[in-house]
Amino acid sequence: MMARINLQLFAGEKTEPATPRRREEARKKGQVAKSGELGVAVMVLVGFLTISALRPFWMDRIQSLVRHFLSTAHEWDGSISALQGIFLTALYQAGLVLVPVLAALFVFAFASQALQVGFMFTGESIMPKFSRINPVEGFRRIFSKRALVEFLKSVIKIIIVAYLVYRQLRGAVGWVVGLGLTDLLQSFQLMGDTIVRMASWVGVVLLIFAAADYLYQRWEFEQSIMMSKEEIKEELRQTEGDPLVRSKIRQKQRQLAASRMMAAIPTADVVVTNPTHYAVALRYKADDMEAPQVVAKGMGHVAAKIKEIAAEHGVTIVSKPELARALYKTTEVGQQIPPDLYPAVAELLAFVYRLRNKAAQA
């Protein structure tokens, strides 16, 4: 016996990509695809590269500060004012050294976030929510798939960073052993080179890791905002209205347009017919129009209704099948006829006007 599958069970599956409205709602709530690893990697890399670039300036500042303290040591009397002077001088020199680094970190950290999510501010993420203090929800977050992924990422990062540090320190064993035999300036130079080189390697690896993490975060975000077919239908109903209502509105609009069209037939100069399938009503006022205008057209029973109304109001009806078909296919109601039909329509109107003059003379 063949098993029956109830397709309604799959109606709620989130199988459709998110709509622009869903994405905008998620963005307003602060839900975007971004990697926190990128900011860390950029700060490590930019920070130590800036330090490396400014190292000659730093060494000059440190030497100047040491010379200043040594040259003024005989003036120190242990008073509070003297200590304040020492503190302010050291603080000023430290500011000269640290401000460029902090400025570079701020600019690049901001840029790394702006490149991921653009300029965005939302208060949704800082609003108090009961789920954040609910122990059950907290327990679920701790043991969720996302928490497991974050734990594995942290373990991998620690292993990679530890290996890089070990590799750099192993290469520095030679000069570390003889550190006591070198002068102070050279010792600082060697330590600085090693630290910057180590940090640069760590920064590059973290940057690669951050790029991979961003791709994963983007995939996870796309999965989290996917929608079911029912959700898309509901959103469509909310934005554009119920399909049944829209259908009734369009039907009413067609009825109104048809009513206006039928009301304009008595103003026509002539109705061109197929003679049974098509009917096109034309009007021409030389003072107001550059070319004749179609005021009504139709096929089948609509064509029959046009001819009926035209006959009731004494509008001339002429059978010209080719012209009727051409007018129906090329010109909409309210439009003027195309130039290539000018000769045929002019001949037709001349014929109609002659009929009217004869009827008037009779």
Image: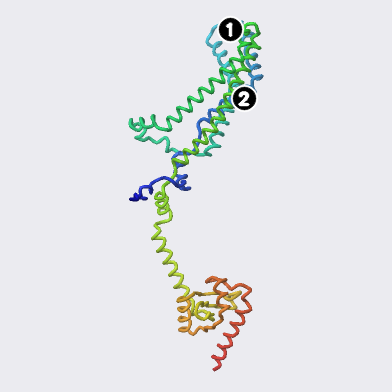
The residue that appears at 39% across and 60% down in the rendered structure is 245
Q: Label 2's element?
A: helix
Query: On the image, which quarter does residue 337 sit in?
Result: bottom right
Q: How is the image coloured?
A: rainbow
| Residue 237, label in figure | none
Q: Label 1's element?
A: loop
Category of crowding for the residue at label 2, using alpha-carbon neighbours closer than 10 angstroms: few (below 14), some (14–19), many (at least 20): some
| Residue 49, label in figure | 2
Nearer the observer, 121 or 43: 43
Residue 156 place in picture, x, y as percent? 50, 25
Residue 263 visible within the image: no
Q: Kindly report the distance in space between the C-alpha atoms of the residues bearing marks 1 and 2.
A: 38 Å
- Earlier along the polypeptide chain: callout 1 or callout 2? 2
User: What amino acid is labelled 2 in the image?
Assistant: Leu
User: What amino acid is labelled 1 in the image?
Assistant: Trp
User: For this view, does 158 lie left or right of residue 92?
Assistant: left
Query: On the image, which quarter does residue 151 sit in?
Result: top left
- Above or below 165: residue 258: below
Residue 223 place in picture, x, y as percent? 45, 41
Nearer the observer, 149 or 134: 149
Q: Nearer the viewer, mark 1 or mark 2?
A: 2
Q: Which residue is the extreme one toward the front?
A: 1
| Residue 76, label in figure | 1
The residue that appears at 56% across and 74% down in the rendered structure is 327
